[in-house]
Amino acid sequence: MRRTHAWHVDEELAAGYAAGTAAETDAWSLEKHVEACGSCAARVSSAVGSRDGMGAVLADIRAGVLAAAPRRAPTPRPWHVTRGLRVRPGSRAARVLWAAGPALRGPWLTALVLVATGALALAYGAGLGGAVRPLLLVVAPVLPLAGVFVSYGRHADPLHEIAAATPSGGLRLLLTRTAAVLGASIPALTLVGAALPEAAGGPGAVAWLLPGLALTLAALALGSYVGCRAGAATVAACWAFAVALPTVYASPQGASTPAAEAAPYFTGPGVQGGWAAGAVACAALLAVRRRSFDHLETS
């Protein structure tokens, strides 16, 4: 095997490593390389996951580690490489880069920017004016769900099996990455909503915050039963069919119609109180179900 500056793990080596037949020196080189190369980490993870019964083996190994070892952080190495940046494992930069998760490094962040800039363009460039804010408000609660969808699970993280087996894995890791998603989406969407023209009788720019929080917690709670991807997709689909699509369908009929369609879901103390109560209930269910995230997802 050639050792060049541009060396990457090929399919043959990944398959040999997954099967346990790779030479010791090749296996050592592979393990060092995937610490800094996401594409090769994904290739190796795919090769390991494709082996029959490997999911059950990994789950058994993790269960044994959790049962036999105290839940404490491993001793850090002097340096850690994260996407080409050399940072100390205990430094703030390392924690931030690790906690951000896949959502803030992938297409979701681009989609968030496109939604924000697109809303401004429709309001001021296309002349839709006050009709755009209600449309943004019915889309805004779904965007954090999309971030959760791509933040956690074996489909989102090439090294999910390793991360989930650490003391910081499971629900703690999921909540950290969800907080990163909300930390990016809430300021951006709220500021854009405030910059859009108001519609008569329409919801305010911050009216989506409690619904968005409730839907996010609902997706996490449902994910404790069916997995994060399925939970987020189910909640997003229900919101889309019940709220988003009817409001968007009403938009060509005039600036006041989208506001009237969206208002029942956002406007009034009773409605906002209902969303707050729903958020608390979902948070309580999530706390009860927290141990379910200690097991590796299988789908």
Image: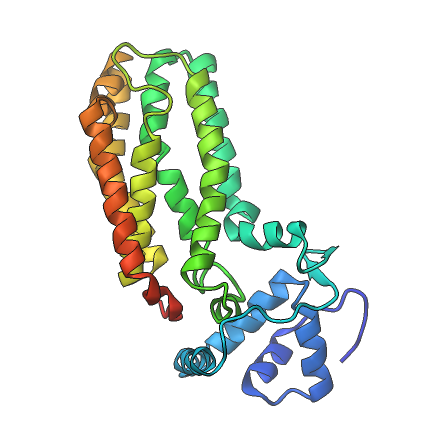
Residue lying farthest to the right in this orientation: 4
Q: Quadrant of residue 63?
A: bottom left
Placement of the C terminus among the 4 image quadrants: bottom left
Residue 163's x, y, as percent? 52, 66
90 versus 119 height, above or below? below
Which residue is at 54% across, 46% downward? 104
Whether residue 254 is visible to the viewer of this picture, yes or no, is no
Q: Give the x, y percent position of residue 97.
A: 61, 51
As displayed, is residue 71 above or below residue 105? below
Q: Residue at 29% x, 35% y: name it.
A: 211
Q: Is residue 102 visible?
A: yes
Relative depth, front residue between 19 and 224: 224
Q: Is residue 243 above or below residue 268?
A: below
User: Could you tell me how many numbered marks the image carries?
Assistant: 0
292 vs 46, left or right, is left
* Placement of the N terminus among the 4 image quadrants: bottom right
Residue 297 locus on image (x, y percent): 38, 68
Percent across and percent down for residue 284 are 27, 51
Residue in the foreground of this view, choosing between 27 and 210: 210
Left or right of 92? Residue 242 is left
Q: Residue at x 50, y 63 (%)?
A: 168
